[in-house]
Image (cartoon, rainbow, N blue to C red):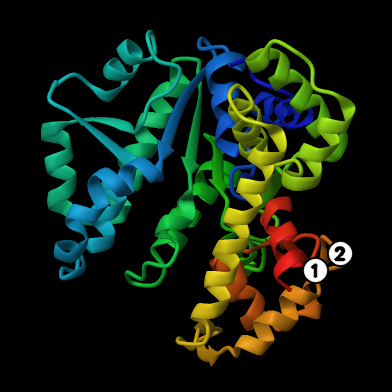
Amino acid sequence: MKFFNRVEEIKEILSILEEEPNLIYFIYGPINSGKTALINEIINNRLDKNKYVVFYIDLREIFISKYDEFEAKLRATKTFGFRLIIEVLFEEYEDDKKPIEIIRSLIKDAPSLCGIPTPKNTLEEILKKKTTKNVFKYITNILMDIKREGKQPIIIIDELQKIGDMKINGFLIYELFNYFVSLTKHKHLCHVFCLSSDSLFIERVYNEAMLKERVDYILVDDFDKETALKFIDFLSEEILNKKLSDEDKELIYSYVGGKPILIINVIGKLKHKNLKDVLNILLMDEISKLKDFLSNLDYIKPKVNIEEEIIEIRKEDIINALKLFKGKYEIEVDKIPKAVYVYLVKKNILFLYPQRGTLKPQSFLVWNAIKRVL
């Protein structure tokens, strides 16, 4: 399927890449708003391979395939944080060639690399030293080699928050941030982009004094109504080989809003199902999930950690918070106690905009469920 829209976001990111590295950029937005699709479109189709070397590290894949099997063992050792950084950033090779030689050969056939290529014997030496300082120094030397070849290195980490809560001599992620600040604002050596759908993680970053004036944010939100209707047109012609009526397009938007993945889901099912049936099934499923969530609150007492204080949340506080959305899609964050909205964001019911100071349901579908259940 051809890529659709995101013209302004693509223009902004390409403009950033044309300039000298100076900030860490966080690309964030609600779940399934298209962040990864956007960055893959840029990597695969918008960048000159003769100018850029991209390291795209998807922590979804790393944590599923590598992290889980090591977690218990590594947590029992003092080298957990160090080994985790190795797992995240490096890609081991049996070849004894220098990393820059490996990079030269790989980028001929691939738009991006999934980690810093490291010969096995070199990685073993790094592991023996057991310090992040040596890891970062090694990466910096490779990035400088890339610059000397006349290319601009780019590091992209998708779902960085997956290592955000792991404490090893302080927060592990702060070590990474300090290093990324060094690469961007201090050395101007490498562009760094971090993708996340975790708005609480973005809030932590936004409020972190260490990162003030060292980071910037690119919001990839669900489509607005005008764009969503155009996307429906685009998909219906692409998938169904026809246009839908204005009435049908409005109906789709009223149920799922501008969430790209939900629109794709609806249009795909129209090949063999009735539109109203498709939309009603989606809504009833979301209503069922919300009812289960609320009924479970009768049996559990949810707690969240707010600034090192464990706060217990009452069911009535959660219901009162959700009722605020019966008449509005987006509300000010100070209308809901922090412990309550943190819990609802963690449960992927609400999404937080740190820069705006507002909250909204994760999708129109969730919003419709809230309005019907409450």
**What residue is rendered at 31% in x and 51% in y?**
85
Residue 28 can be seen in this image: no
Counting other residues with Cα less than 10 Å from the Cα at mark 2, is it few (<14), some (14-19), or many (20 or more)?
Answer: few
Labelled pair 1, 2 in contact (Cβ < 8 Å): yes
Seen in the picture, residue 136 relative to 166 is either above or below; the reply is above
The amino acid beneath tag 1 is: Phe
Residue 319 can be seen in this image: yes
Disc 2, SS: loop
Figure quadrant of the C terminus: bottom right
The amino acid beneath tag 2 is: Lys
- Residue 23 point in image, percent of width and height: 64, 44
- Residue 154 point in image, percent of width and height: 51, 30
**What residue is rendered at 75% in x and 46% in y?**
255
User: Which residue is tagged 1?
Assistant: 325
- Residue 101 point in image, percent of width and height: 28, 15
Q: Nearer the viewer, residue 29 or 74?
A: 29
Counting other residues with Cα less than 10 Å from the Cα at mark 1, is it few (<14), some (14-19), or many (20 or more)?
Answer: some
Q: Residue 328, labelled with which disc?
A: 2
Disc 1, SS: loop
- Residue 101 vs residue 43: left or right? left
Seen in the picture, residue 96 relative to 142 is either above or below; the reply is above
- Residue 350 point in image, percent of width and height: 66, 64
**What residue is rendered at 28% in x and 61% in y?**
81
- Residue 88 vs residue 189: left or right? left
Quadrant in the picture for residue 361: bottom right
**What residue is rendered at 75% in x and 26% in y?**
231
Seen in the picture, residue 296 relative to 233 is either above or below; the reply is below
